[in-house]
Image (cartoon, helix red, strand yellow):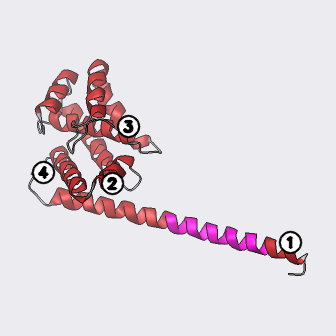
Amino acid sequence: MGTWGVNSFDNDVAMDWAAEASLGGRDALSAALEAALEADELDADLMAQALAAAEVVASALGRPHDAEAARIAGNLGASPSEAQALAEAAGHVIMRATGPASELRQLWEDAGPEEFGAWIASLTSLRARLSGEEAGSAQPAAAVEVDLAEALVLEVRALKADIAVLRQELADGLRQIRRDILGGRA
């Protein structure tokens, strides 16, 4: 990723998406959100595009973060009713972007705790604007933390299942080695 910052349009990928979205019209919003929600691998570019789309949805709802998102929302002609229909999907995109499987999250974690915290704060603000809550309320931050905790619990459960399978395969492999070495005397 080239230039990047904590806000949704502070990176080259989002700006490139915005230029392409202007050609694709309103369908570009739902396409970017759906792609991120349906993806098996949460690639950083895919998530950056989806977060930019979520920012445009918030702007179309009348709650822009910056002039760029408002300009793009205007160019796409997204009405508040269309944006409201996409707001829930945009909220889910934020959950996926901040989850443990997200490459974008991993990049922000690698940038350091201060940068990661600023990015989470930016997404908390976006989530609040999507839901219509006041930006200063504690609820959106708590919701993001709950979503992160739930994602981590699911990840831990998956890891435990993988470990159980590996243990069984190891035990089976050791039994086979014993049979091979001892020539069936085990």
Residue highlighted by disc 3: 34
Q: In this image, 101 relative to 179: left or right?
A: left
Indicate the secondary structure of the residue bearing disc 1: helix
Tell us which disc is closer to us: 3 or 1. Answer: 1
Of the pair 172 and 81, the residue shown nearer to us: 172
Residue 42 at what x, y percent from top left? 41, 45
Is tag 1's residue or tag 2's residue first in the polypeptide sequence? 2
Q: Is residue 175 above or below residue 81?
A: below
Which mark identifies residue 110? 2
Residue highlighted by disc 1: 180
Residue highlighted by disc 4: 133
Q: Type of residue at label 3? A: Glu
Q: Is residue 25 above or below residue 32?
A: above
Magenta stretch: helix, strand or loop mostly: helix
Residue 81 at what x, y percent from top left? 20, 33
Is the residue marked by circle 2 packed among few (<14), some (14-19), or many (20+) residues within 10 Å?
few
Is the residue marked by circle 3 packed among few (<14), some (14-19), or many (20+) residues within 10 Å?
some
User: In the image, what residue occupies the spot 31% across and 22% down?
Assistant: 20
Which span is picked out in magenta?
Answer: 159-176
